[in-house]
Image: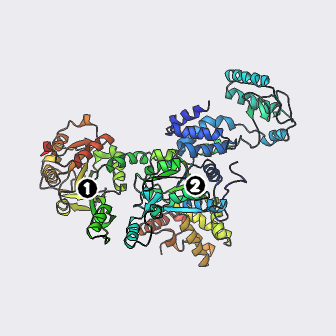
Amino acid sequence: MAGGSQGYSGSDDYIASKALMEIVNVAVILKKPLVVKGEPGTGKTLLAHSIARALNKKLLIWNIKSTTKARDGLYVYDTVQRLNDARFKDKDISDIRQYIKMGKLGQSFSSDEQVILLIDEIDKADIEFPNDLLNELDEMSFHINELDEEVTAKHRPIVIITSNSEKELPDAFLRRCLFYYIEFPDGEMMEKIIKVHYPDIEDKLVREALKKFYWIREMDGLKKRPSTSELLDWIKALALGGIKIEKINNEIPFLGTLLKNEQDTDRFVRVSTNQGGFGFRRR
Amino acid sequence: MFIDFFFMLRRKGVPVSIKEWMSFIEALYEGHFQSNLNHLYHIGRAFLVKSEAYYDAYDLAFQEFFGGIATEDVELDKVLGWLENPLNRLPKMSPEEIMEFQRQLEEFKRTHDLEELMRQFRERLKEQKERHDGGSKWVGTGGKSPFGAYGYHPGGIRVGGESWMQSASKVATERRFRNYRNDIILDVRQTKMALKKLRELKREGTEEELDIEETIDKTAKEGGEIELVFSKSRENSVRIILLMDTGGSMLPYTELCEKLFSAATQANHFKEFRYFFFHNCIYQDIYEDMANYKNVPTEKLFSLFNKNYKLILVGDARMAYSELFEVNGCIDYFSTNDKPGLDWLSRIRDHFPHSVWLNPTHKNFWGHYTVDTIGKLFPMYELTIDGLKDAIKALTSKTRNLLHQ
């Protein structure tokens, strides 16, 4: 199968390129983890939500932080609870099982139906973190030492891993995954994305706004280039503020929604005043 | 034949591993994919290329390998029309016939190569004007021609179902990922792994880890009254100061130093990481920025940081004799120094017992009087992965290298 009418083909509120759909489908069929990388605001996290909706499967989200350890995703043994229970003797504490709490990865393995597991922003964790998950993702099983038991996935979950490329991921880890780099959407794609979010917005406004948006993005020397979410905020502000289209042509209202730090705003003003024909003047 | 694509990728610099290639081939053989070049392009990339930095190299390899295939416009709709509704889907064959086909297949493999076949295919397409079912020459269904669908020809070309002569090579020729080629980031990871060795685990910070042994001991002593004991989690206590030379002679090594610098700044496992810059040699001021505008008195190094900080100096240690040994020898005409650089360097060495000097130039070029002198002050290592490892070993050793006392 793959692609086309069957399998994943985007969802109502998420626009995916054809290539991405194909790769998601391959990942689903082969049950291989899919690493999705890209600039912030390219919809990496939303992809997993969209797949879950389109395939009608449950989504488990494991948000990674700098302190997250690979073990946290498997299981946690709640010693304090057990000690506490031992003190009051109102519970049978001989069964360790009740003190083993599954982490997100553990939950996805022990689930009775196939689920989608989103490991979000894996690059936030320690540099060794992905390597600690190698075996678990490969074999889709892990060992609980306290019970001397093996947890094996009943249904291999569909694993989507996102990375902001803050850190390079280890090769051994990447070798076991499929990899997709989401490019920043081009104008055409962006128009579709905007339509999904604000279906009633005027076409002409969108087009003018996009022109300006890409112009700012291509400006050299910006610390943080505006991304999709900033664009959506900006367009919302334009629409709500009832800004006339001609006005966008001449200046950029609500610049603060696009550029979030002072240096970038300065840089923007400098560039736009130097380009004579543009007609943007500092006020 | 197809394995050549693997070697092509490697030749173009895409670090494809055998494991990745095998899983790609397995997936191909399991028949999950459409026979469509565009599809193959994207799927292949997902399997074989694991960083956008190599997307461009992949495009180049793909273009070179598959480029020839789709150069001609084939009237695909027409051809597919011929192949619709085959009259006789699968010819029945006896075991003997199958044996015969296998023999032919071997024969065919020996005598034909793909390119020749593609050439014939294109020619045949040009000549052919109508639909054919059966037969052994034209593109059609159920026949024994090498071209067509639902037919039997050993090693022939199947044209069917999906259009496979699409324009994947067009995508490849666009080379949209050229800008993502970023050779700098490529071995930052290696450097980071080396820096990772630079740690001393100590129990510090808030008490948040449950110490089970202690808890059980205490609880037993209390006669069963539960006493929870928490301990501090182990944290890296290494504090680093990086001092980098931004002088003109360092220009050729900018990239190398950038790698070290970005690896060190990104490695967030240090307790503290501070960096300063200097120009050729250190005098009364060091700088907070690379352009040497924001100066900080070098004295501050001694007052702000104690001897537990580990100091890494990076520079080629190559300068004019006067810059190191003389008063007012500083290379910048607007700057004066009432103490020679060597005095400052010695003071730094005395204040920071754990210090190393990383030199981006090759060991063979260290035979220079200032390099020698500085090399006697600080243990000097090459700025390579191996040199870095040695330097880190020296930094973490408990005793100071006596040779340099």
Q: Which residue is mark 2?
A: A157
Q: Tell me: residue B12, above or below residue B221.
A: above
Instruction: Name the element at disc 1.
Output: strand
Q: Image point 42% across, 48% down: which residue?
A: B185
Which one is in front, A177 or B163? A177
Image height of B116 relative to B182, above or below: above
Q: Amino acid at mark 2?
A: Pro
Q: Nearer the viewer, residue A176 or A124?
A: A176
Contact flag, marks 1 and 2 (Cβ < 8 Å): no
Examine the rendering and report whether any part of residue B315 can be seen. no
Towards the viewer: B58 or B143: B143
Residue depicted at 51% across the width and 60% down the height: A104
Whether residue B160 sits left or right of residue B24 in the image: it is right
At x 68%, y 35%, the residue is B69
For residue B18, say whether it is visible. Answer: yes
Secondary element type, mark 2: loop
Above or below residue A225? Residue B256 is: above
Output the chain of dot 2: A
Q: How far across and down, in percent of the image, does residue A34 sit? A: 56, 51
Left or right: residue A27 versus residue B312 is: right
Residue A248: x and y, percent? 58, 71
Res. A237 image quadrant: bottom right
| Left or right of B154, for residue A73 | left
What residue is shown with label 1?
B241
Image position, residue B393 (x, y; %): 25, 45
User: Which corner quadrant holds the N terminus of chain B?
Assistant: top right
B67 vs B245, left or right, is right
Q: Which mark is residue A216?
A: none
